[in-house]
């Protein structure tokens, strides 16, 4: 066995190497190759490492699918899955990680670090390596490194489930402190609204036109005025909505006849999220009736949408929650339970019938140029991950 200090430094060195590898959403092949090579160097059978075809079904046609590594158990027990996502946000491309004591930051002040989520990848890779190198006893295990989490949980959403070999419980590593346990997350719905107006010359005959921009503006003002935009609270029901993108128009002398609006709605309550979506649809349909040309002609709207991820909350009695809590407490720490207002790979994992709790790996200020990795927290996360993988406190 490695000495404690050598093991710690090896873990740190590896995660720094991983953060320096570019891999924005859809371009994860290089980091997938790195992880694969490290597994093989630790003693993994190449045949036990697979990639699926999720990237052929995602919104971005990526260069790599989800990376899956399976290990038969040394004793009989329910199969456990440990997961993290490989992609980073675009601001992290070109990152040059620099260690200062027990913190890692980006050398370039204009570049993010990519600790989200290379730290999570490092936690589960480290667990797999130590089991392989030291032939540690363990239950049946599946390790999953997902693609395209940052663009709508695409990798976990489109994963080939049969490749996972039927895990019964799951542990997902993403952002936050090592003792944070995210047992639930909001659900999200994404919409595209195409507003059609009638074009005309804005100087010669504006009265003949129907402005798609005016329709969209009235709809958004309606949502804001009636409390359906931004933070949404109606009685005990809470959620959010956001008009995030408006595209349309090419010249000031033309009444704009087409605008594309992209909107999202979120809530921990499925029914209330659906209510928010209905109110958005109603606002745009009402706005259409308010803008007419001199011939009483109106525009129209085309509304489409899709579920990004469904909300979930796990009971504290759920086996994955109980195991993670017991492991954290066995290390001398107290778990901090949380429910996230954003989506996680755990949303889709849980939706597929594999209850998944998410934990952190020491990442701070994700998606920002000030992003950093707290190595003390990262090393704690590695110990927690190894204990979960080897079946401690199970």
Image: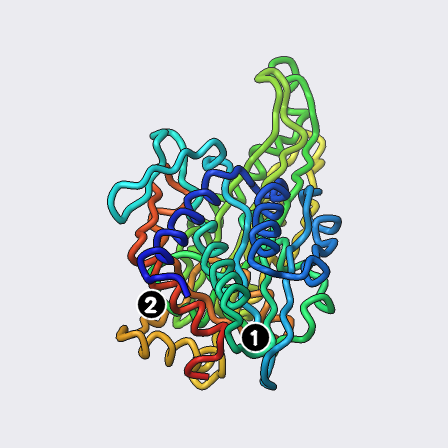
Whether 170 is drawn above or below 341: the answer is: below
- Position of the N terminus, as image quadrant, is bottom left
Q: Residues within 10 Å of mark 2 (few under 14, many from 20)?
A: many
Q: Left or right: 216 with respect to 60?
A: left
Instruction: Decide which of 214, 140 is in the foreground and name it.
Output: 140
The image quarter containing residue 181 is bottom left
| Residue 79 screen position, x and y as percent | 60, 78
Residue drawn at x 32%, y 53% is 375
Decide: marks 2, 1 in contact (CB < 8 A)? no
Q: Is residue 155 left or right of residue 357?
A: right
Residue carrying label 2 = 179
Element carrying mark 2: loop
Q: From where the camera sits, is residue 278 visible?
A: no
Tell me the residue that label 1 is attached to.
80
Q: Residue furthest top?
A: 204
What's the residue at 46%, 74% (across, down)? 388
Above or below, comparing residue 107 to residue 176 in the picture: above
Residue 70 picture quarter: bottom right
Seen as rendered, the residue at the extreme left is 101
- Residue 65 at what x, y percent from top left? 68, 51
Relative to 18, residue 369 above or below: above
- Left or right, 233 with respect to 48, comes to left
- Residue 63 horizontal/vertical position (percent): 69, 42
Who is closer to the viewer here, 335 or 344? 335
């Amino acid at each position: 066995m490695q000495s404690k200090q050598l093991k710690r430094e090896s873990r740190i060195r590896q995660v720094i190497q991983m953060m320096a590898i570019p891999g924005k959403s859809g371009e994860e092949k290089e980091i997938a190759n790195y992880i694969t090579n490290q597994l093989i160097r630790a003693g993994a059978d190449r045949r036990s490492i697979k990639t699926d075809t999720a990237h052929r079904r995602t919104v971005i046609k990526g260069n790599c699918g989800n990376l899956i590594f399976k290990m038969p158990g040394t004793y009989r027990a329910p199969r456990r899955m440990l997961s993290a996502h490989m992609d980073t946000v675009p601001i992290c491309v070109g990152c040059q990680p620099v260690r200062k004591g027990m913190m890692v930051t980006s050398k370039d002040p204009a570049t993010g670090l990519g600790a989200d989520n290379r730290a999570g990848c490092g936690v589960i890779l480290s667990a797999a390596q130590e089991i392989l190198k030291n032939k540690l006893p363990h239950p049946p295990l599946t390790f999953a490194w997902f693609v395209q989490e940052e663009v709508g949980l695409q990798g976990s959403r489109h994963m080939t489930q049969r490749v996972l070999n039927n895990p019964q419980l799951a542990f997902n590593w993403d952002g936050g402190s090592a003792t944070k346990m995210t047992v639930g997350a909001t659900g999200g719905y994404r919409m595209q609204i195409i507003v059609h107006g009638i074009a005309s010359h804005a100087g010669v005959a504006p009265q003949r036109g129907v402005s798609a921009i005016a329709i969209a503006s009235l709809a958004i003002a309606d949502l804001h005025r009636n409390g359906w935009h931004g933070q949404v609270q109606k009685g005990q029901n809470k959620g959010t909505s956001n008009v995030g993108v408006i595209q349309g128009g090419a010249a000031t002398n033309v009444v704009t006849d087409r605008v594309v609006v992209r909107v999202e709605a979120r809530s921990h309550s499925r029914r209330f999220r659906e209510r928010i979506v209905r109110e958005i649809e109603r606002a745009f349909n009402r706005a259409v009736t308010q803008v007419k040309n001199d011939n009483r002609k109106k525009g129209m709207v085309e509304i489409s949408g899709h579920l990004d991820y469904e909300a979930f909350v796990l009971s504290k009695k759920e086996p994955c929650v109980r195991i993670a809590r017991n492991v954290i407490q066995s290390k001398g720490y107290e778990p901090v339970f949380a429910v996230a207002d954003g989506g996680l790979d755990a949303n889709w994992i849980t939706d597929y019938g594999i209850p998944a709790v998410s934990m952190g790996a020491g990442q701070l200020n994700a998606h920002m140029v000030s992003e950093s990795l707290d190595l003390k927290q990262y090393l704690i996360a590695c110990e927690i991950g190894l204990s979960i993988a080897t079946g401690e406190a199970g």
